[in-house]
Amino acid sequence: MISTHRSNTEAVAELYDSFSELHSRVCDSNLHLGYWADASDHSTFQAATERLTALMVERLAPLTGQRVLDIGCGIGRPAFHLAGGHAVEVVGVSVSRCQIEHASTRAREIRLADRVHFELADAQYLPYPDDSFDAGWFFESLIHMPDKPRALREAGRVLRPGARLVIADMFHEPGEDWSAIHPLVTALPLDAYEPLLAGGGFDVLDVTDVTPHIRVPEPVRRRLRSMLLEHRAEWVDLAGEEVVRTLLDPETDTFYTPGLGYVLITARRR
């Protein structure tokens, strides 16, 4: 029998093996959502995703010489952003072999491979000794982990006392668990994070609900649809006809799900 954990991990890996290329082209190698000041902010998707990364780095408050664990690293763009602006070492982990290969190649291309490394590993079973890292983050990755208490305990185990942990995650509003129909994600209510972090050995320093800021303004969606139309056949090859047709539908906001919230959390290892 295949365990639920193993089945989910393999399915998530397959998902990101397939869709990393699509996400990277839309978001300039960022696989997370963007941050817009308000509906009048028409920044590109690429600029908005970089702004969210900058907010994560600000919360992490990295110090020179620190070793940072990027838990669920995607294809490396946030790690490169972090290492490009701060003299730190970053270790990124993902269950997707394709992502690790892509990120490692890119690290060599931009000459950051001496300080940014990527390894195939499961966040729920990290292959590192206790107290190995000075800081870490889950950047839109905790949502994919079915055993979130274990993932946070593992983060607490490998982070040193006093280390910062920063989380960007999608949650669900009360009574609107949008994740229930999605087999590869499990969303939490907002008030569940603090006790979970406490169980992992963390004190919560800040919780900020940024849900209004992740809504994609209509002009940005229009630009995305224009780009898709221009290269429609190529996008269909990458993502499939159904996905492209949905993205092109002007009546559908594919970036909005009723009940979906987005939170930034800063915590400290006890």
Image: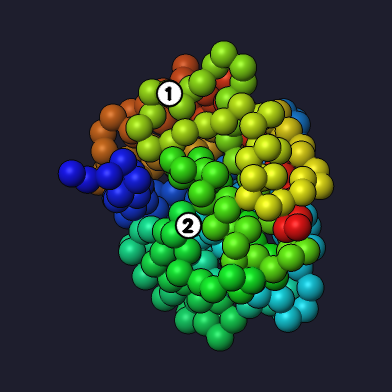
Q: Closest to the observer: 168 or 81?
A: 168
Q: Residue tagged by mark 2? A: 123
Instruction: Say above or below: 250 vs 50.
Output: above
Establish if 53 lies above or below 232: below
Quadrant into which the C terminus falls: bottom right
Q: Residue at x 81, y 47 (%)?
A: 205
Looking at the picture, how far across and down is residue 162, in whole percent? 78, 64
Quarter location, residue 77: bottom right
Instruction: Tell me which residue sits at (44%, 59%) in the image.
Output: 125
| Alpha carbons under labels 2 and 1: distance apart | 22 Å
Residue 3 point in image, percent of width and height: 27, 44
**Numbered label tally:** 2
Q: In terms of sequence position, does the residue under pointer 2 or pointer 1 come before the other?
A: 2
Q: Which mark is residue 232?
A: none
Under mark 1, the amino acid is: Ala
Q: Residue at x 59, y 66 (%)?
A: 158
Where is 60 relative to 186, above or below? below
Q: Amino acid at mark 2?
A: Ala
Q: Position of residue 195 (x, y in %)?
A: 68, 37
Residue 173 coordinates in the image, percent (x, y): 62, 21
Is residue 84 shown to the viewer in this render? no
The vertical placement of 225 against 44, above or below, is: above
Q: Quadrant of residue 78?
A: bottom right
Label disc, if present, on residue 180 of the rendered structure: 1
